[in-house]
Image: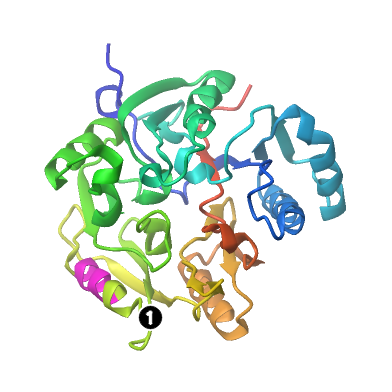
Amino acid sequence: MDSDAKGTGYRFPAEWEPQSAVWFAWPTREDLWPASLATVQQSLCELYVLVSRFQPVHLLCPLRAQPAVRERLQRAGDSSGVRFFDFETDDVWIRDFGPLFLLSAGGDELAISDWRYNAWGDKFPLQARDNAASRWIAEQLGFSRFPVDAVIEGGGIESNGAGQILTTEAVLLNPNRNGPMDRRSMEALLEQHLNAQQVLWLGDGLIGDDTDGHIDNLARFFERDGILLASAHQQDANYPVLAENLERARRFRTLDGQPFKLVEIPIPEPVYLNDERLAASYMNYLLVNDGVIVPTYGQPTSDAHAIEVLQGCFPGRRVVGFDCREILQEGGAIHCMSQHQPATNTPSP
């Protein structure tokens, strides 16, 4: 019996395709954002309410915490679009430990590709609950689940929905994920389990990125033949890496041999926590139905420019900024803490 995407004809859709929900995970550990947990929790409730204006929000949150979260949600606005699921996670970065949703060839069914999660190369000891989340969600939703005995995080791969995947050597070839791994071996895994026809490789990631260099801080497809790329001025310490990634992207070709349309968005001015630079990027936006939620960093000129560029790339959508300065202190932003669930072309029961 086939038990992978290629054998069953499922594909890994692009994020701009229609969605049925967005998943989040509620932070319950007191050591997350130790100096500002209450502030961040209220900010997250405001984010959930904002996203729920575009489409349903599914929130992993243990039953014991739900009354307090509901109260916070009410303070943030209309939370009728937020649905709770009684599951406690170790952390909030569901993009990385959550399910990779696959869409059937006919577009009428979803399945879950469930890769192992090891907290970005065993950087953090608490990871067992997060690693179990995809299986639990598959059981709750009644979706087929294709387990994969290899490590991949959702923030480390980007799909154009047409068989091409964008990623980085710094993550997928890092021995802290799957031991020694060359390009060909990883490409074979992506072909088998995500039905990838071609993998486009960038190099390294941003300074301060605990993930070693996730693609969702560096480059995103905005259409099948278009790529958004983070850039930096020459005095920025991130410039050499981002310039090299841009040169690689200029050599990329679509499946029919054409160059990609490339659009650059400069990263914000450096953001620090205790003298350590954080991985701030506008690439960490979330696409929702008819909208784009963009991380902002209290830098009016660069924030506004990023919103303007994204509006040009997604002209039919409402582009909304969301302040991520507090959220970023734990290492990620909006895309990192969300996981979109594609829609099927059949009505939900």
Q: Give the answer, above or below, for where 341 lies relative to 245.
A: above
The crowding category of the residue bearing disc 1, from other C-alpha atoms within 10 Å (few below 14, some 14 to 19, many at least 20), is some
Query: Is residue 18 toward the left or the right of residue 266 in the image?
Result: right
Identify which residue is drawn at 20% across, 41% down: 186
Q: Position of residue 169 (x, y in %)?
A: 24, 55
Identity of the residue furthest to the bottom in this view: 235
Mark 1 residue type? Ala
Q: Which residues are magenta?
A: 243-250
Q: Residue at 35% across / 46% down in the picture?
A: 161
Horizontal and vertical percent position of residue 268: 50, 78
Instruction: Identify the image quadrant of residue 265.
Output: bottom left
- Can residue 152 be seen in this snapshot? yes
- 296 lies above or below 305: above
Number of labels in the image equals 1
* SS of the residue under disc 1: loop
Predominant SS along the magenta part: helix
Q: Which residue is mark 1?
A: 232
- Picture residue at 42% right of the left edge, 61% below the top: 209
42 or 176: nearer the eye? 176
- Locate residue 264: give its quadrant: bottom left
